[in-house]
Amino acid sequence: MSSKLIAPSVLAADFGNLQRDVEMINNSEADWFHIDIMDGVFVPNISFGMPVLKAISKHANKTIDTHLMIVDPDRYIQTFADLGTNILTVHYEACTHLHRTLQAIKAAGMKAGVALNPHTNINVLEDTLQDIDLVCIMSVNPGFGGQSFIENTYSKVSALKEMIIRKKANTLIEIDGGVTDQNAKQLTDAGADVLVAGSFVFKSENQTETIKKLKAIANS
Ligand code: DX5
Ligand code: ZN
């Protein structure tokens, strides 16, 4: 069985010490950098934009997994490729022509991800699954770090895993929101491949150790 990945969310980092926190991730057992881009329209909050991602990319030495919580994401596909993104995730709810958007992300040299809000059923991806490298199941309503995990996520993960197997797709399942040591194992047992963790990592005493522990639990 392939190993389960941990993607710390930089949204929860200390922006006054951003380089320090990026180096912490570089030197930890984390697998990816998770970057949350919010526009204040698709979600109520505004996070950070291109100049900050550019600064992160300059120091990051791991896969950059960018989660766009913005309307009309097609406008920025090339920009995020140029900023060093390896996996670009758009929201299903923000894309009128999802299939076209996925092709455009791949044409720009990135892997293509689709995020689903908690209210969106996985069945909407039946006809595009083979074109999707990663499905990000939102386990909170997007827009803020530090929210509580929505329990319905487990059954969503199992159902998506079944669909991936049935369709013989090569799609990773990522979970985003409220991930802790308390739900990590149940999520990976249900079929999750990548766990995003913001507050759980950055609010802990020893962040490097927390990442290591979370990864061990996810792979136990
Ligand atoms: C929420 C973001 C998440 C967030 C997760 O809209 O997409 O990536 O940073 O933060 P925690 O782990 O604190 O729920
Ligand atoms: Zn995210």
Image (cartoon, rainbow, N blue to C red):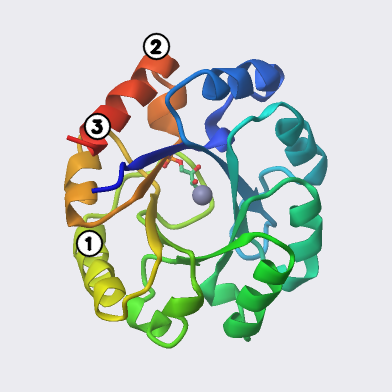
Q: Is residue 201 left or right of residue 85?
A: left
The residue singled out by tag 2 in the image is 205
Mark 2 Cα-neighbour bin, 10 Å: few <14, some 14–19, many ≥20 = few
User: Considering only vertical position in the picture, is 114 above or below 62?
Assistant: below
Mark 1 or mark 3: which is in front?
3
Q: Is residue 98 visible?
A: yes
Q: Position of residue 118 (x, y in %)?
A: 37, 65
The quadrant of the picture occupied by the C terminus is top left
* Quarter occupied by residue 212: top left
The first of marks 2 and 1 along the sequence is 1
Label 1 close to label 3 by CB (< 8 Å): no
Q: Mark 3 vs ligand 1: CB under 8 Å? A: no
Q: Is residue 107 left or right of residue 125?
A: right
The residue singled out by tag 3 in the image is 181
Which label was assigned to residue 220?
Answer: none
The kind of secondary structure element at disc 1 is loop
Q: Residue at x 39, y 67 (%)?
A: 170
Q: Position of residue 185 (x, y in %)?
A: 19, 41
Q: Residue at x 22, y 62 (%)?
A: 152
Q: Three-letter amino acid code at disc 1? A: Asn
The first of marks 1 and 3 along the sequence is 1
Q: Residue at x 53, y 75 (%)?
A: 93
User: Considering only vertical position in the picture, is 186 above or below 55?
Assistant: below
Q: Mark 2 vs ligand 1: CB under 8 Å? A: no
Label 2 close to label 3 by CB (< 8 Å): no
The residue singled out by tag 1 in the image is 152
